[in-house]
Image (tube, rainbow, N blue to C red):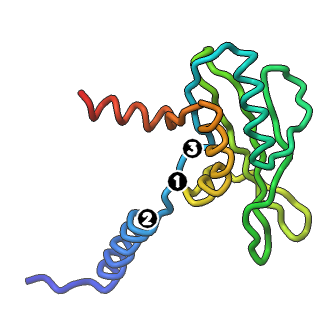
Amino acid sequence: MRPVNSTTYRVSVAAVFAVLVLTGCSPSLSPLYRDFEHNADTDDVRERVERALTDANWQIDSSVDQTLITTESRTFKHWLLYRVEASLQVTEVDGDYVRVLINPYRVYFTGRRSKVPYLKKRLGRSVMRDFQRELDQEGLVAIGTVVERDKEDTDDS
């Protein structure tokens, strides 16, 4: 039997530890958007989305593009060195559904801002909770993300 080299052993332990950390402790991430199906003409959908935003206490911001509804930022998390703010952008896609894009930012105590490139599911739920409830009341049904819909399609086949 060959003796174990201590360097090899340390590298192996580090590799196993890295795999465990990366797979077992990785955050559960979700895309920055949500899709909602509707059964109405375009003008009616815009009014229902604006009403849902207002009822969920989002301030609608002026938008350069008339097909896009934007909101002002709201704070969702306060940490020691930064807070997490998010704004929403809502637009109709292909006349069949509405896409809600969540724009999260970290705002550091220094005033510097940085874009959050992903959403932890918990943050996504807190940003969308009230707005999704209002969209449901307006008749817009959550259909998930493209990734979720593709997964359902492959599970069904």
> What percent of the width, then of the height, locates residue 150?
40, 31
Mark 3 falls on what kind of element?
loop
In the image, farthest residue toward the front? 137
Q: Which residue is mark 2?
A: 22
Please tell me whether residue 40 is drawn above or below residue 76 in the rendered image: above
Please tell me whether residue 77 is drawn above or below residue 145 in the rendered image: below
Using a 10 Å C-alpha cutoff, classify the residue at mark 2 as few (fewer than 14 neighbours), some (14 to 19) or many (20 or more): few
Residue 2 relative to residue 94: left or right = left
Q: Which residue is mark 3?
A: 31
Q: Which residue is mark 1?
A: 29
Residue drawn 78% across the image and 46% down it:
87
Q: Amino acid at mark 2?
A: Leu
Mark 1 falls on what kind of element?
strand
Q: Nearer the viewer, residue 145 or 40?
A: 40
Mark 2 falls on what kind of element?
helix
Q: Nearer the viewer, residue 52 or 119?
A: 52
